[in-house]
Each structure stands twice: as structure tokens, then as C-alpha cells.
Image: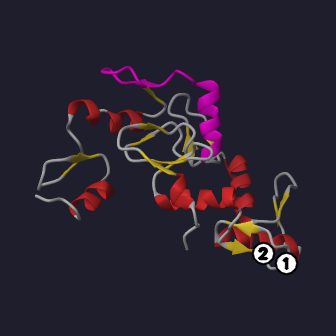
Amino acid sequence: MTTQGSESHLKHFSKTTKARKGRKSGAEYSDGIQCQICGKLYKNKSGLHYHMQHHTGKYGHKCQICQKGFTTKQSLEDHKLKHSGQSYNCDYCEKSFSGKRGYEIHMRSHSGLYPFYCDLCSKGFSLQKRLTEHLNAEHKGEGFKCETCEKIFHTQFGLERHRPKHTGIYPFMCDGCAKGFLYQSNLKEHRKTCQM
């Protein structure tokens, strides 16, 4: 399913693009796609497609009871639990959740196991969004500095992905034309049209 008009909101980047407002916590995309409405960055059209549903109001999944729209089927299924009266209850603090996802995210706070960690201070976060907020609030201007251009990255990974822009040595190279790519998926896409 394609959201009508979403193509007009795409802005492609062939050079490095800052993703602080995007979905990758300070990391960078070599070929990102930016929402022209709010500036958030996405790695691919699919990510932007789901995001655009929030702007257009044209959701792919709709609750038949209250007509609320959702970007994913899983979000709709979690929402339907609100209407059924079913809930997930925390055994530690008595909080109650209508959706399984919210409950699972909450349980991370009790287990101490987090899927997202700050590379600068090792603090853990249950959501990528919270890590991004932390980086922008607590570590703005800090991080891993590029020796060549002095650009600062929140993660070592972000810096490693940036370095080839100066060295010309990329992890994925086209055998036909010797063009370099940061991501294997970009190389695969390039090979479809490479003239060499």
C-alpha cells in the first residue's frame, strides 16, 4: 500500500545527512530520506511511508470499533485490547497496560536489561526514542570526534561509518566500477544498474 502524495515529501541525500532528528540516535545515514514536513530522517522509503501516515491521516489499519487509525497491524491488535477489557498487569508495581508492547517495554525498567545503551555514559534505555532524547540533552557536543573534519558522533559505529568519506575505503565495493558503499544493501541496489 502506498500513501498517496508521500513521494512529494521525500528528500534524498547522497552525501552525509544528520540523523539526530531521525530514527538512528545520532548515527548517520549515507543515503537517508527526510520527511519534508517535520524533518525526521529514515533509512528507507518504508520507514518514511509509515511515518507519513501520521501526517496524512491515511492509516493502513483502522479500528472497527472507534475508527482510530494505526500504522501497523500489531499496533491495531494492541489497541483492540482496550476495547476488550483485557489488560497486562505488572507484578512489581501494580501498573496496568492494555497492550502487550507497552507492558513489555515497562518490564524492562524492572529487569535492568535495556536494548539501547548510551556509548558515552553506559546508561540504558527501554526505547530508542529515550536514548536519542538523552544524547541530545546530556551529551550535546560530546562523543566520538572525526580526526579529519572534527564532526562529532554519538556512537563509535557512527564514526566508523563516517570515516570512509575521507579515506575513500568503503566496506562494500562494486567489482564493476570500483564505487564504494557503506551498506551492502546500497551495493546490491547499485549492481542492478552498474554499467561496468
Q: How would you rate the neighbour count of disc 2 (Cα within 10 Å): few for under 14, some for 14-19, many for 20 or more?
A: some
Q: Which residue is mark 2?
A: 63
Q: Which residue is mark 1?
A: 65
Query: Is residue 62 shown left or right of residue 188?
Result: right
Q: Quadrant of the N terminus?
A: bottom right
- On the image, the x and y values in percent for residue 87 come to 84, 68
Name the amino acid, label 1: Ile
Q: How would you rate the neighbour count of disc 1 (Cα within 10 Å): few for under 14, some for 14-19, many for 20 or more?
A: few
- Please give the range of residues in magenta: 128-151
The answer to if 65 sits in the magenta stretch is no
User: Residue at horizontal 85%, vertical 78%?
Assistant: 65
- On the image, the x and y values in percent for residue 12 come to 43, 48
Q: CA distance from mark 2 to mark 1?
A: 5 Å
Quick one: 180 or 193, which is closer to the camera? 193
Quick one: 166 or 115, which is closer to the camera? 166
Q: Residue furthest bottom?
A: 64
